[in-house]
Amino acid sequence: MSAVLRPSAPPQVETPLRRFASQFAESRLALVGLVVFVAIVLAALLAPWLAPQNPYDLAQLDIMDGRLPPGSVGASGMVHWLGTDDQGRDMLSGILYGLRISLMVGAGSALVAALVGASLGMLAAYAGGRTDTLIMRLVDLQLSFPAILAALMILAFLGKGILNVVIALVVVEWAYYARTVRGSALVERRREYIEAAQCLALPTGRIIFRHLLPNVLPPLIVVGTMQVARAIALEATLSFLGLGVPITEPSLGLLIANGYEYMLSGKYWISFYPGIALLLTIVSINLVGDQLRDVINPRLQK
Amino acid sequence: MTLYLLRRCLQAAGVMLVMSVLVFVGVYAIGDPVEILISPEADQIERERAIRALGLDLPLWQQYLVFLKNALHGDLGRSFVFNEPALKLILDRMPATLELAFGATFVALLVGLPLGLYAGLRPNGALARGIMAGSILGFSLPTFWVGLMLIMVFAVQLGWLPSTGRGETVDVLGTRWSFLTLDGLRHLAMPAFNLALFKISLVIRLTRAGVREAMLMDYVKFARAKGLHPSRIVLVHVLKNIMIPVITVVGLEFGGTIAFSVVTESIFAWPGMGKLIIDSINVLDRPVIVAYLMLIVLMFIVINLLVDLTYTALDPRVRLEGRT
């Protein structure tokens, strides 16, 4: 019986995927965004091989190379395409390594927040009643309070550190996932296939994970994409304020903060280039997310 | 109406209570309260005395009640750094922050409304498309980086505007204000614009959506049929209707603006409470942190209430009594 009802997936999967790809490619801007984003992720992953210098290895730094403008040649004969910071660190290398931290924190926090938020959202939708009210009240409370302040508050108590930043970001972001998942789960719950699964007396866990979850995944992915960009921007802001990542592992935000004091003397590159990297990352993710939303939204489907 | 207000105030008190528990747990349970509340320079005897004076030898729930009692009396501790009551310290810096936030709101409406109106009236024009693309940038540009770039261009390269501080101020009713002097306005310009960036985008989008919807309504058709001048239709009839969502969102955003002024104040060395909280976190001046958080929560509750009330005043269709 259950064999009949089980969706026979493999042979049919290819077509929707292709249709999805061609629909996504309809927006040239989104394609550009995707290409830029993939390039950024690759650059971050391959940083140890791409970067001309290991910015964490103090032996490779020469203080005499400090604050060189872009394109100048350092004492070791290396060309610093994007200049150097106050400690003689090559900015290009710093940015490549900084991207790793920024992306890791952004993606990591988004993933954990999605897990927590989706579970709570699912619980709210499935349990209903008091549980639902309680969870949604918490969501409202969280959303009515600006993310930056909530994160600030948490970091004020926990102190600096990559893990603490991730915790803070998870706390301020879970509500978005919970609200999204609850909304679509409530709609999906009333569909016939769930009713059928319930009539078959399938265990609740199986219904939730095998039937409900795959169908609430698309909106979750859209929210997730946007939240990664938000998390990266928030982390950069917190690090800029000196509350985020430690100086030993600078993210893009901290690199920008380092250049802040040299800005007034006209040494713009220490802040400028990490900012461009941050900007490209955030905008490319947002472009991809925007198009994903349009493609995935069933109401807009032709 | 009275009943509604009463209920809202009760709700607000509830939220305050929840937040006070959260802040209390944050300071007293997660961190080490002795470390947090007693100055690190105190010697052993002073510490012992302070522990007893602060009631840190009591069980946790009793400590909370003491904290709550003191908070209700307006006593949120003394700053280690300034040796002044934390609450007073923050209230002293509040006008600067409010000035910045109001300035940003004003800039957002001043820039956002006309651009949004234009984009809504000519949705397919090249300029309108440009405006919308610009508004996407406004959403995704990291504010603090834009602030730095503003300093780089207008303060360092061009030398038009000062990059830090409030400039010359004028005393009105016992508080100092920058916006009344030319020098103060020049100091206010960049921070206010920086803080307004996100809101400009928001106002543009809301106005555009509102105008596009309103232009199809019967009352606009009727006004046209009456032979009213197009500018009167747009500026009086349409604008009145789209102001409702715009004011709601801008009002709700006001809290966010005050929150985000933390970043702007840090960049432009604007001496408001946002800069104070960052400095306090950096030197672990926890009483100030606690006071700031309690104050900001209170502010949020008041803003939410005010927005709801304004909303009713603007839109008579909202029946407060009928709401649950």
Image (cartoon, helix red, strand yellow):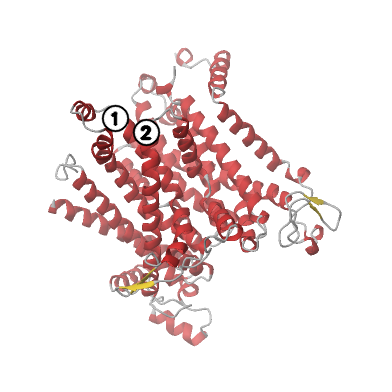
Coordinates of residue A294 in the picture (x, y in percent): 47, 27
Q: Nearer the viewer, residue B92 or A250?
A: B92
Coordinates of residue A256 in the picture (x, y in percent): 62, 55
Residue under the point 27% across and 50% down: B307
The local secondary structure at tag 2 comes to helix
* Subunit bearing disc 2: B
Residue under the point 18% across and 54% down: B5
**Residue A154 seen from this side:** no
B29 to the left or right of A126: right
A102 to the left or right of B232: right
**Which residue position holds label 1?**
B215
**Picture quarter with the C terminus of chain B:** top left
Coordinates of residue B76 in the picture (x, y in percent): 36, 72
**Which residue position holds label 2?**
B120
Which kind of residue does numbered mark 2 sit on?
A: Gly
> Local crowd at mark 1 within 10 Å, few (<14), some, or many (≥20)?
some
Per the model, the C-alpha gap separating discs 1 and 2 is 9 Å
